[in-house]
Amino acid sequence: VAEARLGFALAGGECGGKFRGFVDDAHSLAAAAGRGLDQHRIADLRDFFGDVGRDVALRAGDHGDLCRESDRLTRLVENILDFSRIEHGRKQYRFEKIDTGDWLRSLVGIAEQRRPIETSLPPGLPAVQGDREALSSAVLNLLDNAIKYSPADAPVILRASGGDGWVTIEVRDRGCGIAPDEQRRIFDRFYRSAHTYGGPAKGVGLGLALVQRIADAHGARLRVESAPGHGSTFHLSL
């Protein structure tokens, strides 16, 4: 019930123009998705949704900001629900052949609602086999992560290349970078780096954990190259 009501609020005809009851629904959703999690993690989710609800109320005077916030919240809720399904063994994947170039260009169009994305997508990229929805979630999470951890004027770059039977998707930012000791932890659920621009990082620390689990389900390889002050590059090879 909470999922349906929140989905209606977020995806309504006016970009979720009326958020009445949003926080209560989000709390219910967080509790449902958090079954089996320890209580302080559920409290983290509830606190986060409460902060988001207040933030949305402050932004309500700007329709463009409201639309972007609605999209961000929708992706966040989808992450929580997908992660819960995966953790409880209820996630079902539907593999199909995907035109890599067209698919990635469609994702760039979504991400560019928040930040211009520089791309390098050569013609003739090999197709990939996978669940389109799940892989889209993985790439969008990598792009969201790059945007989140880099300054507003820094470019985010998406590249793809093919060779030796693999297609490698790279998402690069010129943000704050990741220390070597943190690189071992960033794919853990609920982990959020303390190093970001413009205040505390938003989210509940599930994005990269979800990417890792989607990669594992596809037999893909996921790795990061990063150094403090020099940005990060995430490589997803399918």
Image (tube, grey):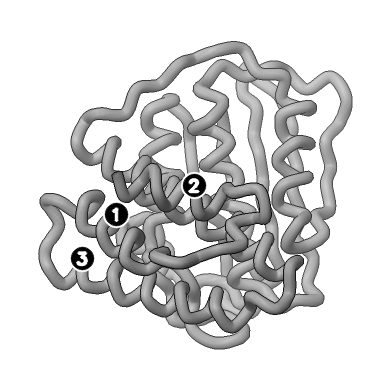
Q: Is residue 79 left or right of residue 15?
A: left
Q: Which three-letter amino acid code belongs to the residue tagged 2?
A: Phe
Towards the viewer: 147 or 5: 5
Neighbor class of circle 2 (other Cα within 10 Å; few <14, some 14-19, many 20+) is some
Tell me the residue that label 2 is attached to.
8
Q: Which three-letter amino acid code belongs to the residue tagged 3?
A: Ile
Numbered disc 3: secondary structure: helix
User: Farthest residue in the right direction?
Assistant: 123
Residue 29 tag number: 1
Q: Quadrant of residue 129?
A: top right
Q: Is residue 199 left or right of residue 203?
A: right
Distance (Cα) linking label 3 and label 2:
23 Å
Towards the viewer: 28 or 153: 28
Distance (Cα) linking label 3 and label 1:
10 Å
- The residue located at (69%, 63%) in the rendering is 173
Q: Position of residue 82 (x, y in %)?
A: 37, 41
